[in-house]
Amino acid sequence: MTTPRTTGGKVLLIFYGFFGCAGAILFFNLFLERIITFLAYILRAIHEREMKRKLGINNNHKDQRRDSGSIDEDSLNDWKPSVYWVMLILLLGAVVVACCASAMYYPVEEWTYFEAIYFCFVTFATIGFGDYVVSQKESYQYVHLYRLGNFIFIVIGCCCIYSLFNVTSIVIKQTLNWLIKKLNCECQVRRKQRGRRNAITPGHLRRVKGHAVKVEIDADSDSDQESGRRNSGEMISMRDFLQANKISLALMQKQLYETQQRSQGASTNGFQGGVGPLAILNKKLGQDDC
C-alpha cells in the first residue's frame, strides 16, 4: 500500500488529488453524456421501427406507409426514451462488467466468487474500504496482462456504476416528488374535511361574512342608482364602478392569488435537477411520472 510519508509528499498529494478528482468527475460526466446519447439513439431507432411496423400493419398501400413514415419522423422529434429502460440497460451492463471482472479476480487473488463480486462493487462505486485489495502478492503469472485487465475493468466499471447511480437518482427524485404531491393532496383534503365539520362559525369569520353581506347590500343599492344614471345617459365613474363590483373583483383577486400559489408550488415543490449530471439526464431522457 503506497502512501505519502513526508510533508512535501502529502502537500503534493493534496494538489494532485484536487485536480485529479476534478478531472475524474469531468471524465465520468462526459462518459455519462456519451453513453446516454448512444442509448437514446438506440432506443429511438427501436421505437421508430416499432411505430412503422404498427402503421404498416394498419395501412395496406405503400404510399400510405411512406406518408405515415414521414409523419412519424416529424412526431418523433420530441420523443425521449424512458429513464426506466436506460436504468435497466445500465444495470445489466454493470452486472456484466462485474461478473467478467470477478471471473478474473477470484482465481488470481484466490478469493471466492462472492468476495470478488463484493470487491467489484466496492471498487466500482469508489467506496474503497480496503478490506480486499488486488496486486498484493509477491509474484503473479502474466503480471502485465493482469494489471492491464485490472485497469480496464476498474475504469469501465466505475463509469458504468457512476452512470447507473445518476440515473437511479432521477428515479429517486421522481419518487420523492410523487410523495410530496401525495402528502400535499392529503393535507388539502383533510383541511377541507375539517372546514366542513365545523358547525359553529368563528367570530372573525362572522364579522367578515357580515361585512361581505353589507357590502353586497351597498353594492345592490349603488347598482340601482347607477342603473338610473345609465338610463339617464350619464357616464359612470371608476369609483362608482369599483364600489358596485367590489365583491366580484375580490373573488377574481382571490382566484388569481390561488392560481399563482399553485403555479409556484408546482415549480418549487419537489427536486429539480438543473446542474451537472441531472441536467444531462433531464435533457436526454423523458422522465415518466411515478
Image (cartoon, rainbow, N blue to C red):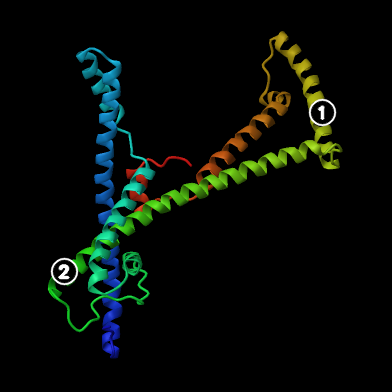
Query: If the image is split into quadrants, where does the N terminus sit?
Result: bottom left
Residue at the image point whose x is 31% and y is 27% from the top: 75
42 to the left or right of 232: left
Tell me the number on the disc at residue 10.
Answer: none
Number of numbered labels in the structure image:
2
Name the secondary structure under disc 1. helix
- Which residue, as the protein is rendered here, is positioned at the far bottom? 6
- Residue 270 image offset from top left, x and y in percent: 51, 48
Question: Is the residue 46 above or below the residue 8 in the image?
Answer: above
Tag 2: Cα neighbours inside 10 Å, few (<14), some, or many (≥20)? few
58 to the left or right of 234: left
Q: Nearer the viewer, residue 114 or 127?
A: 114
Tell me the number on the disc at residue 148.
Answer: 2
Question: Is the residue 243 above or below the residue 83 in the image?
Answer: above
Residue 108 appears in the figure: yes
282 to the left or right of 205: left
Kindly identify the amino acid type of the residue bearing the numbered disc 2: Leu
Residue at the image point whose x is 27% and y is 30% from the top: 48
Q: Quadrant of residue 74?
A: top left
> Label 1 belongs to which residue?
213
- Residue 91 image offset from top left, x and y in percent: 34, 52
Mark 2 → mark 1, Cα distance in angstroms: 85 Å
Tag 1: Cα neighbours inside 10 Å, few (<14), some, or many (≥20)? few
